[in-house]
Image: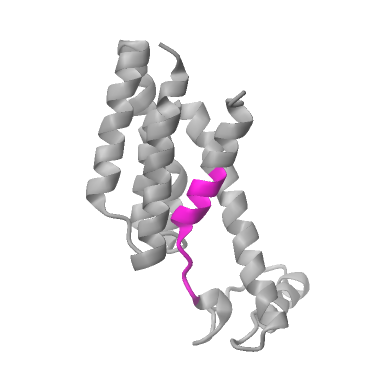
């Protein structure tokens, strides 16, 4: 059996989670747990006991990658659990690469939000705050964090499951060409 059998269930998981996150800003635990269980089961079917080890290790790596972001408050717990579930399908190296792609996508989305504040004056722009933090760093050599103001575009949370879905899908296409 070929590892491509892991692609469709993983894609269904991440895109279902992205839709849930867009609609309610939450990722249901049942969805993530079912996805993780399916990933472990499919890994066992594809690769036997070695697949189970890859799935469990992938789960731990996926969780470890986004757990610091959750602890700091940059991502939600559902995002960390979703990346852990993705790890059961992709294994440790795959989830590491997919997570890095997802973080890159999330950064690009965040930059899009920041630049939208320059174009659309509907919300407070973060650029003055960023400039002050940068100036403080260059003058004193010490970093300074200034929290976003109420109504600032960067103070709004965006559904990171969308970044996970886009980044992981992109990684899958790059890794496993469909042709």
Q: Is residue 97 above or below residue 140?
A: above
Which residue is found at the position 72% from the left and 81% from the top?
Answer: 119
Which residue is found at the position 65% from the left and 83% from the top?
Answer: 125
Q: Quadrant of the C terminus?
A: top right
Q: Position of residue 137 (x, y in %)?
A: 71, 71
Look at the image and tell me whether residue 105 can be seen: yes
- Determine if the magenta segment contains residue 160: yes
Q: Is residue 175 above or below residue 18?
A: above
Look at the image and tell me whether residue 62 can be seen: no
In the displayed structure image, the side of residue 159 where residue 119 appears, left or right: right
Prevailing secondary structure class for the magenta stretch in the rendered image: helix
In the displayed structure image, the side of residue 117 where residue 73 appears, left or right: left
- Tell me which segment is drawn in magenta: 156-167
Q: How is the image coloured?
A: one colour
Which residue is found at the position 38% from the left and 60% from the top?
Answer: 21
- Determine if the magenta segment contains residue 116: no
Where, by quadrant of the figure, is residue 107 drawn?
bottom right
Which residue is found at the position 44% from the left and 48% from the top?
Answer: 66
Q: Residue furthest front?
A: 179
Q: Is residue 29 above or below residue 48?
A: below
């Amino acid at each position: 059996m070929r590892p491509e059998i892991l692609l469709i269930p993983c894609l269904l998981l991440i895109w279902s989670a992205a839709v849930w996150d867009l609609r309610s800003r939450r990722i249901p635990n049942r969805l993530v747990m079912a996805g993780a269980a399916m990933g472990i089961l499919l890994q066992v079917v594809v690769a036997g006991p070695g697949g189970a080890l890859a799935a469990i290790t992938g789960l731990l790596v996926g969780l470890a990658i986004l757990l610091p972001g959750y602890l700091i408050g940059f991502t939600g717990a559902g995002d960390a659990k979703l990346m852990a579930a993705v790890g059961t399908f992709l294994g440790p190296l795959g989830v590491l690469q997919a997570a890095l792609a997802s973080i890159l996508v999330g950064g690009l989305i965040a930059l899009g939000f920041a630049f939208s504040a320059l174009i659309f004056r509907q919300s407070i722009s973060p650029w003055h705050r960023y400039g002050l933090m940068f100036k403080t760093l260059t003058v004193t050599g010490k970093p300074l964090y200034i929290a976003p103001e109420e109504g600032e575009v960067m103070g709004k949370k965006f559904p990171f499951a969308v970044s996970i879905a886009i980044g992981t899908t992109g990684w899958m296409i790059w890794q496993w060409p469909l042709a």
